[in-house]
Image (cartoon, rainbow, N blue to C red):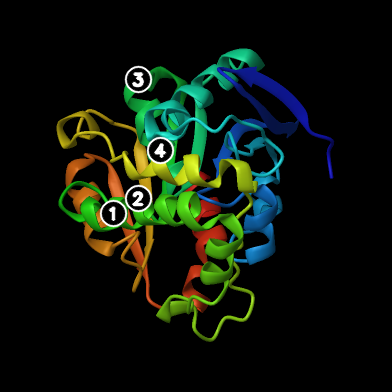
Amino acid sequence: MSTDSYFERDGATIAYQYSGTGEPLAYAHGVPLSRAAVRRLGLLDLDALAKGRRMLTYDARGHGESTGRPVADDYTFDNFGRDLLALIDALGIDQPIDFTGSSLGADTALRAAIAAPERFRRLVLMIPPAAWDDAPFAQNLYSEIATVIETEGADAWRDQWATTDPLPIFADYPAFDLTPAVSDDLLGAVFAGISRSDLPAPDQIATITQQTLILAWDTDPLHPVSTAQKLQDLLPNADLHISRTAADVKTWTNRITDFLT
């Protein structure tokens, strides 16, 4: 595996890899995971997506091999979007890229495409996070997590998180592992920042004209099918696929590859 490179922006050092040959493709993970955690889950094959591509993967600020500071405002959706655009600038990518993102990464794709549409060719939005009318449940949960971490400590919350039942769709998938890839000193700030976030406004999303593939899975209140369906209605060139079994989620790599070719 390639060695990480590093990019600094606004109190964080972003660890990334940009390698291979071909048309550029980027992937961004969700909270509170990392590139390594996504690989460990075994649901999405990043190496297969990278074949014949110049592939950019990175750990979001405060996650995985990237650093950050314990400031909640650093971890709002807006700031993650700014990180991506600054990284693209730093790499000198001067052609539109295909961008794939899971959860937080899906918001990053939307937000960056709104701010700089000329930089993106096609978008893949995996498990878009709960938004608009669906957002309060997720926002309240993340706020409660931040409070537990602040009052009881990161270890206490990690113990609670480790004993949480998997989503029903993954009840029979033994590799399902959402162990946070965030250090104890940043956990509270990360969740506090996320709790203050929502997807961009619907009228902004409706301006995105790129061909878009939306991939959702069922039984997840933090990434509800209803949000994915609303996105399909808003985006003028979007297709939606909903998975109801773990086996079908594992078809997403091929679905993305077919969509991008």
From this viewpoint, is residue 193 visible?
A: yes
Residue 193's label in the rendered image is: 4
Residue 105, horizontal then vertical, whole percent: 47, 42
Q: Work out whether mark 4 precedes mark 1 in sequence or the reverse, and give the earlier one.
A: 1
- In the rendered view, tell whether residue 233 sits above or below residue 11: below
**Distance from Cα at disc 2 to Cα at disc 3:** 27 Å
Q: Residue at x 34, y 71 (%)?
A: 218
Label number found at residue 140: 1
> CB atoms at circles 2 and 1 under 8 Å apart?
yes
**CA distance separating discs 1 and 3:** 28 Å
Residue type, label 4: Gly
Tell me which amino acid carries mark 1: Asn
Between 89 and 146, which is closer to the camera in this rendering? 146
Mark 4 and mark 3 in contact? Answer it, CB < 8 Å: no
* Residue assigned mark 3: 115
Q: Is 159 rendered above or below residue 146?
A: below
Q: Is residue 111 left or right of residue 255?
A: left
Give above or below for 204 relative to 246: above
**Residue 249, percent from left and from top:** 49, 69
Label pair 2/3, CB-CB below 8 angstroms: no
Q: Secondary structure at mark 4?
A: helix
Residue sitting nearer the eye, 189 or 59 = 189
Mark 4 and mark 2: span between their CA atoms?
9 Å
Provide residue 5's location: percent of width, then percent of height: 77, 27
Determine whether, in the image, residue 92 is placed left or right of residue 119: right
